[in-house]
Image (cartoon, rainbow, N blue to C red):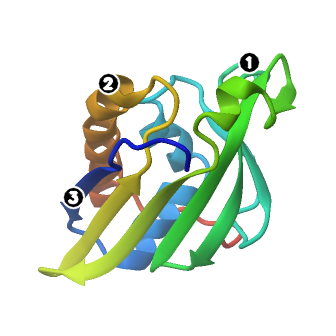
Amino acid sequence: MNTTRPPLHYRILIHAPREHVWRTMLHSPTYERWTAAFCEGSRYEGSWDTGSTIRFLGPQGDEGMVATIAEHRPAAFVSIRHLGHIHGGVDDTTSEAVRAWAPCHENYTFTDADGGTLLQVDADVFGDFEAFLAEHWPLALQALKTLCETTPTPSGDTA
């Protein structure tokens, strides 16, 4: 990462098993529900498999972020390596504005704690988004907690 700003750190205790929290976090339709705190209608395209490209998109599908999954250990750890922005449906990983912060990481650690799951988020700050992230991460994590504690585990493919 090319910025000197310290990463943001968040922790939340969720009263649900790790696998349930992990699945709720990464599977549709619950992924779209908790990430609405950042952008209503957000979604992703791609795979959560280590080494895979993943695109985080807004509701129109032509704006967002492009990343790779740096590491994924199911129900234990996910590391997203953000590489750039998507503008007008085109990935931008080389402009001067992107090179000022890319790559940066967003890491999720899931551990057993107090009969539930402690989710820790460590997120590098990118671009001019520090205030936005500081405001919206707590809202997103509270939404995820509510989903995990009130929604059955999503079915479907593995994340």
Q: In this orientation, which residue lies closer to the viewer: 150 or 58?
A: 58
Q: In this orientation, which residue lies closer to the viewer: 102 or 64?
A: 102
Label located before the other in sequence (3 or 2): 3
Q: Amino acid at mark 2?
A: Ala
x and y percent of residue 111 in the render? 30, 80
Per the rendering, the mark at residue 131 is 2
Q: Which residue is labeled 3 in the image? A: 12
Q: Which image quadrant is residue 43 in?
A: top right
- Is the residue 14 above or below the residue 1 in the image? below
Label 1 SS? loop
x and y percent of residue 153 in the render? 47, 66
Label located before the other in sequence (2 or 1): 1
Q: Residue furthest right?
A: 90
Q: In this orientation, which residue lies closer to the viewer: 120 or 142?
A: 120
Q: Residue at x 46, y 62 (%)?
A: 107
Label located before the other in sequence (3 or 1): 3
Q: How far is mark 3 from mark 1, CA to CA? A: 31 Å
Q: Which image quadrant is residue 142 in?
A: top left
x and y percent of residue 75 in the render? 47, 78
Q: In this orientation, which residue lies closer to the viewer: 117 or 91?
A: 91
Q: Residue at x 27, y 53 (%)?
A: 9
Q: How far is mark 2 from mark 1, CA to CA? A: 24 Å
x and y percent of residue 12 in the render? 21, 58
Q: Which residue is labeled 1 in the image? A: 60
Q: Residue at x 65, y 68 (%)?
A: 70
Look at the image and tell me whether residue 159 can be seen. no
Q: How far is mark 3 from mark 2, CA to CA? A: 20 Å
